[in-house]
Structures are given as structure tokens and as C-alpha cells.
Image: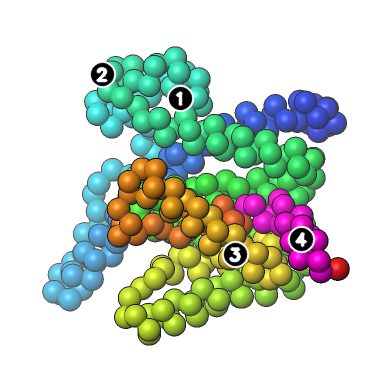
Amino acid sequence: MFDSIIQNPLTLAASVLILGLLVGSFLNVVAYRIPIMMRREIEEDYAALQAEQSGTEFEHDSKPAFNLAVPASACPHCQHKIKAWQNIPVVSWLLLKGKCANCAAPISKRYPIVEMTTGILSLVVVLMLGPTLQTVGMLVFTWFLIALTLIDLDEYLLPDKLTLPLIWIGLAFNSFAVFTSLENAVYGAIAGYLSLWSVYWLFKLLTGKEGMGFGDFKLLAAIGAFLGWEALPLVVLLSSAVGAIIGITLIAALGRDKNIPIPFGPYLAIAGWIAALWGDRIVQAYFQFAGIH
């Protein structure tokens, strides 16, 4: 059965699209729960420190378990447990007309949008790369970038729980030279981190302000671990271009206050994804345009 899926392009595309929709549904959970999990961990660490300083015995948090698996998904308004048929990506949202089946409270359009986006981007990956190990790596890369983008937009945060595993996953794939050599991947991770780290400290020394977070360093390190150090200049240039386009659009079309900070992580994620699929073509097109042979 697996061989028949791989050998039939239409079946492969449909399978990856469905998989992408399902993963997109899970990414909605990841983007919502990981920040809450992190806040709980910080609160418990702080409570433990307070207990240690006061010489009292620390009592672990007695709240019910909360992670990516439990509790089961429920309506945030009425706490109605979401049934399996109510959790089908995109389809359930359409059938329910964007409302909770129990209390009729509105369900955010973000859920089906994330599911569709994940499905479409996953489909693009398989259409571009075919049934290869590179496709597997690129799908994982894509899904992590989507989760990180969502969390950064919500919380101005790129959690270590995602950025650090992404670095190791990139290095693991490139130990088989899936995207680049292992040597280039290691230097890519180092260069990705140090380049933004240097910019951060230079900006802080000149202005006394923090221009970006440490999560941005780790995200670019992860992109470097996947694509190698040679791709980093293109990723940085693309992220700046994407940031300028989106920023100007938000200000001009939507009236966004230009003083409200915009997280840099989504721009890096978009640039890294574009560079992974079309980086070589973009560089070749530039060389041809500039008359460089």
C-alpha cells in the first residue's frame, strides 16, 4: 500500500494534503498549549525558589496535568468536550458554521486557516521534491516553522521547546547529506546563531534597546542547520524584504500603529521556507540579472 501511494503522484499528493490538514490541526494545539505550559513551569520554578529562600518545604503544583496530550480539547467558553467528528480539519468548522456545537460561541477562523495553510504548504513541498527523504525533512521543517510563527505572533516568543529540537533535527537529516553536507550544516547552525547575536549586541550598545529576542538567534541557527551556511545571506535578505512588505502593508492597508513591534520570527520562517525550496533559483536569477557568470 505504501509503495502504491509513493508511485502514484495523485495519490501521494492527496495523502500529503490530508496529512498536512491533520498536522495543521495539531499545530493549533501546539501554538495554544506550549506558552501555557511554559508559564506553568516558570511559576513552579519561582515557587520552588521562594520556598528554598524561605526555608519552607516546596509543594508541587496540584493543578491537573496540562500538556500537548491532556486534557482533551474543549470549547473555551462552555468547556464542552470536542467530539471526534467535530475535530475534522476544516470540514468540521464548515459543518458547524464556525460555532460551538454546544453553546454556539464563535470558533476562530484561525483554526481552519492554519489547517488549510499547513495542508497547502505540505502539498507544495511534495510537488516540488517528490517522494524523497528530502521531502520528509522539508515537511518537518515546514511544520515546525508554522508552529513557531503562530507562537511568535501571539506571544512574541520563540520557545526553546521547538527551536532547539529543530536544530538537532536539521543536523540529523544532514548527517545523511539530505539538504547539504553535515559540515555545512554545523557551520550553518553556528553562523546563524552568531550572526544575529552580533547584531543584537551591536544594536543594544548603540541604542540601549533590544532589537530582537534570543529565540531569533536559535531559529536562524535551525535554518542554518537545515540549509547550510551558504543559504544564510539569502535568508537574511529575504526576511528583511518580507518584513518590509508585510510591515508596510499592515501600516498602509490595515492602519496598524507603526510603533507596535512586529516579531521577526515569522519573517525568518517565511524566508527560510522560500530559500529551502527556491533558494538556488533565486540566486541564479539574481546572477543573470546582474550579469554575473
Q: Residue at x 65, y 45 (%)?
A: 139
Q: Number of labelled discs?
A: 4
Marks 1 and 3 sit apart, C-alpha to C-alpha, by 39 Å
Marks 1 and 4 sit apart, C-alpha to C-alpha, by 49 Å
Q: Answer yes or no: is residue 227 visible.
A: yes
Q: Is residue 274 magenta?
A: yes
Q: Answer yes or no: is residue 172 visible.
A: no
Q: Is residue 18 left or right of 176 when viewed as pictured?
A: left
Would you name the residue on which mark 1 appears? 87
Q: Is label 2 or label 4 in front?
A: 4
Question: Disc 1 or 2, which lies upstream in sequence?
Answer: 1
Would you name the residue on which mark 3 appears? 237
Question: Disc 4 or 3, which lies upstream in sequence?
Answer: 3
Mark 4, secondary structure of its residue: helix
Marks 1 and 2 sit apart, C-alpha to C-alpha, by 16 Å
Amino acid under disc 1: Asn
Amino acid under disc 2: Cys
Marks 3 and 2 sit apart, C-alpha to C-alpha, by 48 Å
Mark 2, secondary structure of its residue: loop
Q: Is residue 145 left or right of 123 when viewed as pictured?
A: left
Q: Which mark is residue 289?
A: 4
Would you name the residue on which mark 2 appears? 103
- The answer to which of 168 and 16 lies nearer the viewer is 16
Contact check, label 3 and label 2, Cβ < 8 Å: no
Amino acid under disc 3: Leu
Q: Which mark is residue 229?
A: none
Marks 2 and 4 sit apart, C-alpha to C-alpha, by 58 Å
Mark 1, secondary structure of its residue: helix
On the image, the x and y values in percent for residue 70 come to 39, 39
Q: Is label 1 or label 4 in front?
A: 4
Question: In the rendered image, which quarter is residue 45 located in?
Answer: bottom left
Amino acid under disc 4: Phe
